[in-house]
Amino acid sequence: MASYIIDVVESSPNVLGLIQDALRGTRFTVRSFVKASPFLSMFAVNPPDLAILDLRIFDDYGLNVLKKIRSSDGDKRDTRVILMGLNSSVEERCAVFLNGGDGFLAYPFDPRELYA
């Protein structure tokens, strides 16, 4: 069975733990980051199959990270990206899709939504 790599960039340890628990024991390998800069460094050399980004990361803004992914070279720009946010505006949620995002999860969410 193939293992797919999911990178999660999330500032909250509680939410990060929830996501890790939800995906534990599945066919996914989860790599966790609390800041965008280490994620982007890893992305440059070993991009994931899916990136899950918090809109409000400690050292960057999730939409900025999405734009960096979409402007990457080659197949990297095709990486699937889901953003997550709490109290996000309609404008932010629409911007996710207008900038090439593949999905948006609003906090709080049920872990089953993530796995689906």
Image (cartoon, rainbow, N blue to C red):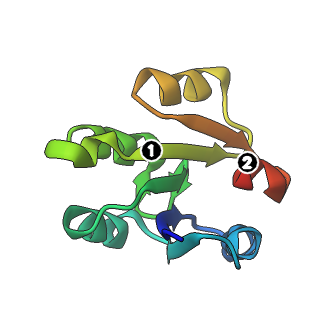
Residue at the image position 73 percent from the left and 48 percent from the top: 116
Q: How far is disc 1 from disc 2 in space, using C-alphas?
A: 14 Å
Image: 102 above or below 37: above
Q: Quadrant of the N terminus?
A: bottom right
Are there few (<14), some (14-19), or many (20+) residues within 10 Å of tag 2? few
**Amino acid at dot 1:** Arg
- Residue 91 as seen in the image, left or right of residue 35: right
Whether residue 97 can be seen here: yes
In the foreground, 104 or 93: 104
Residue at the image position 31 percent from the left and 61 percent from the top: 47
Residue position for label 1 = 80
Label 1 residue SS: strand
Whether residue 72 can be seen here: no
- Residue 71 as seen in the image, left or right of residue 11: left
Query: Where residue 72 appears, x then y in whole percent?
Result: 19, 45
Q: Earlier in the sequence, mark 1 or mark 2?
A: 1
Residue at the image position 53 percent from the left and 64 percent from the top: 8
| Residue with the most extreme left position | 73
Query: Where residue 65 appears, x then y in whole percent?
Result: 36, 48
Image: 109 above or below 24: above
In the foreground, 16 or 45: 45
Query: Where residue 91 appears, x then y in whole percent?
Result: 58, 21
In the foreground, 44 or 35: 44
Query: Where residue 48 appears, x then y in whole percent?
Result: 39, 61
Residue position for label 2 = 116
- Residue 64 as seen in the image, left or right of residue 5: left
